Image (cartoon, grey):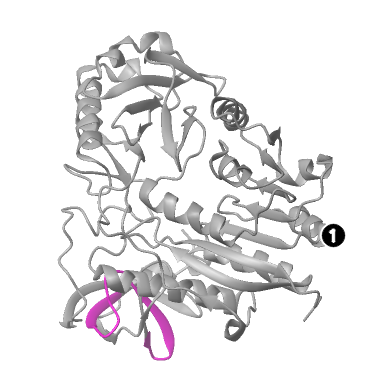
Amino acid sequence: MSKNSMDTKPMVKKSAGTHRPITIECLRLSSDGSGVGYHEGKATFVSGLLPGETGQIRIVEEKKNWQRGQLLGLCKTSAERIEPPCSVFGRCGGCQLQHLNYAQTLLWKKRWVEDALTRIGKIPLEKVKVHPTLGMDEPWRYRNKARLHRGEGNTLGYYQEKSKATVPFTDCLLISESMNRWVREAEAILGQQDKNLFPDLNALTFRENSQGEGMLILDSLKDVRQADVWSEMGGGIHSVWGINSSGEPERIAGQKEFTEDVLGARFKISPLAFLQVNPVQTRKLYNKVLDWAELSTEKVVWDLYCGIGTITLALAAKAKKVWGIEENPYAVEDARENAKRNRVNNVEFMAGKAEDTFQQIGDSPHIVVLDPPRAGAHRKVLEGLLELKPEQIIYVSCDAGTLARDLGILQNGGYQVAEVQPVDMFPWTNHVESIVLMTNSGLKGK
């Protein structure tokens, strides 16, 4: 190799790994859960370091304006630090905050939402009521769904943080004891089979309803006819599905239907349809939406990104008409069936992307509820709302950054953020759900 070719090789990560240990004080938590301090004026992110703590770190990644450090040891410990109860915390990417007192995690999640609103959305918080984060009384074993990856030795686990390496566990404290047992049974079945029988089976999804009934979904299974062995899953697994080569779910064993009760209504849920993962917090979230929505039998409501129609049917109880739009065809089919089963006649569901479909609705909305995916609402949707000028917009979001971006657009178009309610839908993680009430201020561009 020539000298010139050696000179062109990037040196950042190589030199970063040779840095001597340094001591740094943590000043705050970033929205990914990392501690933030400064060394020689450069922002330094350190996973595992809490505000008020001083730690010895080694720089492992270095950029022009920031760097990332690995925590080697603590010199000063925060009184808010707790012992993480999970044996794989710190390696598993499922949780980021198990080392912090739960009440403090709620405070930081509110701060992350406020920071995003001001920094990204340019929302003047002095005119906004940001409520304390709605937490859980028992913030453990709350997830009704877990997608686990197949690792070495046919073990199942979540991905390691910023890696595709699988971290197996003996007891995940975010899912029920029953679901943990199903994971062990699935690992046993995988271990008994020739790897070549399921070469493309790299992930399994477990779902559980409030009645304790389970569903198992085998991802990337090309030939479900080879999957009879999965009928051996017992102990609460009521159905097993495989995703065939066309990307469609096929039932392998058990019952065809999987249902869940939400706000007094029963909902059919297809294997690939979305449902909020935390039933306890979902009730709080939906009740807040219903509390803020000024519903009456004279008003038309749009529910964009409506899923299987959970909040749609609840809104319909006090509205003249509710229109739901959903891109997932399985969810739309579920939504229509759910309306029939619950005898709700003043709803109509449309299949398609919100940005391509909302123009087809004949009724102008008085209230719009939208709950888009993490990427946020499409720009065409936001521009359409600004033209339609509904009285209220209630935005439900699982990403504070894209939420703030979209709120900024709506604010510039004449809407004002009135209230914000953070909800801890995902305890011990860096994720936070938010509900935002916007009203038409008529002050475009202000």
Vertical placement of residue 140 versus 148, above or below: below
The image position of residue 15, as x and y in percent, is 37, 73
Please say whether residue 188 is one of the residues in the magenta stretch: no
To which residue does mark 1 refer?
387
The residue stretch that appears in magenta: 38-58
239 or 164, which lies in front? 239
Q: How many marks?
A: 1
The image position of residue 35, as x and y in percent, is 34, 76
Q: Residue at x 67, y 40 (%)?
A: 324
Tell me if 343 is positioned left or right of 355 in this view: left
402 or 93, which lies in front? 402
68 or 238, which lies in front? 238
Tell me if 191 is positioned left or right of 420 in this view: left
Q: Quadrant of the C terminus?
A: bottom right
Residue 379 visible in the shown view:
yes
The image position of residue 63, as x and y in percent, is 47, 75
Tell me if 175 is positioned left or right of 324 in this view: left
Please say whether residue 51 is one of the residues in the magenta stretch: yes
Vertical placement of residue 151 versus 372, above or below: above
Q: Residue at x 51, y 62 (%)?
A: 434
Residue 3 visible in the shown view:
no
Vertical placement of residue 59 versus 247, above or below: below
Q: Residue at x 41, y 8 (%)?
A: 225
Q: Residue at x 82, y 57 (%)?
A: 388
Q: Amino acid at mark 1?
A: Glu
Instruction: Decide: few, some or many residues near mark 1? Use Cα within 10 Å; few <14, some 14-19, many ≥20.
Output: few
The image position of residue 240, as x and y in percent, is 37, 20
The residue lying furthest to the front in this view is 297
